[in-house]
Amino acid sequence: MTEEVQQGQPRGLMTLFFSEMWERFCYYGMRTLLTLYLVKSLMKGDAEASLIYGAYTGLVYAAPILGGKMADKFLGYRFAVMLGAVLMAIGEFIILGGTEQMLMIGMGALIIGNGYFKANISTIVGKLYTDNDPRRDSGFTIFYIGINVGALLATTIVAYVGETYGFDKGFGLAGLGMLTGLLIFYSGRKNYAAAPGLEITEAGKKKTLGPLNMAQVITIGSLLLIPLCYVLVLQNQILDYILLGLFVYVSWSLIAAGRKADTLDGVAVWKDRMIALIIFMVINITFWACFEQAGTSLTLFADRNVDREIMGWLMPASMTQFFNPFFIIVFGSIFSVMWVKLSKMGKNPNIPLKFAFGIIQLALGFLVTQVGMMFVNEAFQVPLLTLFFLYLLHTTGELFLSPIGLSMVTKLSPKNIAGTAMGAWFLSFAIANYVGGKIATLTGGHGDSGVALTSAEGLDKYLNVFSTIGLVLLGIALIIIVLSGRLQKLMHGVK
């Protein structure tokens, strides 16, 4: 397999594949355990834990916007990725201190590190290919598999180790995974050396502060951003205003750029397309805010109200998150072939309908919990198959949205603001993760204000909230279907 890929793809692809795989092992390993660690070790209430989780994951998705710009202008892609890897590993090991303060500092390092790593390793993959290289799509597909293999390993191995032998062992294992990724990336640097933009730029080498050049100043400055992340995660209500302000500013910037762009045949095509992009950003926020319940309310639901015993073995609650990456690996290639065949038949749904169908599947996943209620046991637990089918539907829904999202952004935006548009798309994920934390607080009660719900009360609360989410999502999907024709008109031929 490896030899075949090496012959058909650039040499550096497999180096980057395994580097990214271990970085995702690190990130998802920590994320998988985070909510349970907050609730069980740091004795946080459900609502507080969910808000911390939402703020953390929201900042993780916002950080690549800054990390990408710093690499483009000053750091070069290789140094940025290595800086990110070191910060992420340090973050994991700081968490081993076992206190809330150490967790917040560690999360700050992980946020900044992820911003450098995640933004720039994908850029290096893209730069292995020329603009019209037919291998590009399959190369990114292989790279995407690496992401999900890393997530699958994290949600099985790290989840099991963390809940069975102690959270510190899980976080430590995630940190070792990141160091493995760093070692692979550095030792295989000759394999991807042909990619342009790897070196620190001339602007980055320029002396800026005494003997320090710009790259060194940015590196030190990155360390100083960790306390800022600490404050934003802990005082997460500040993010309400920051993220809303950013969304308004970015939306205004996109529409203004669309107005300045050339019209086609006298029609304000680019302005309309920017309006369409903003609408898709709102839809994207809606989908992922509910999808990201996996790390918060759905994990706590699994811990308390799901019968996880399999032939005498009790599956750790955090391990139930493995269903998503597992199903992505199983169905990802099937879906990519399906879209091609549907296109040939002339039956490939347009982009608004794909988003609507994805939301419908997400909604049905939440409503599956009502079916599970029919098989509840005496301990007020639903069968594990409930989560199996929930995550199956969530994953097929994801495959209707996720693969086409980035491609859609590049098609809708004028070339001169492609970077700004992509940053806006990443911002929608950041907002979604933050809003997801707020949605998870609706299932709260355990440990909040000294309240402890019984198993029966907890089950009832979870199922009511999940059903409400499902029904609201169905309503939103229906609105998108009704308006799909108008959205399609705003896109002016983009498919």
Image (tube, grey):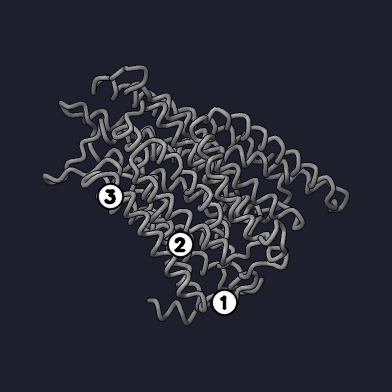
Counting from the top left corner in percent of width and height, residue 222 is at 58, 51
Asked whether, in this view, residue 130 is left or right of residue 492, the answer is left
Seen from the viewer's position, the closer of residues 352 and 153 is: 153
Q: Which residue is mark 2?
A: 20
Q: Secondary structure at mark 2?
A: helix
The residue shown at (40%, 31%) is: 49
Residue depicted at x 34% and y 35%: 368
User: For residue 22, which quarter of the picture?
Assistant: bottom left
| Badge 2: residue crowd in 10 Å (few <14, some 14–19, many ≥20) | many
Tell me the kind of residue under disc 1: Ala
Name the disc covering residue 193, or none: 1
Q: Which residue is mark 3?
A: 169
Above or below — where is 289 with respect to 274? above
Residue 453, horizontal then vertical, whole percent: 28, 19
Q: Is residue 146 above or below residue 31?
A: below
Q: Is residue 235 left or right of residue 382?
A: right
Verify CB contact (< 8 Å) between mark 3 and mark 1.
no
Q: Secondary structure at mark 1?
A: loop
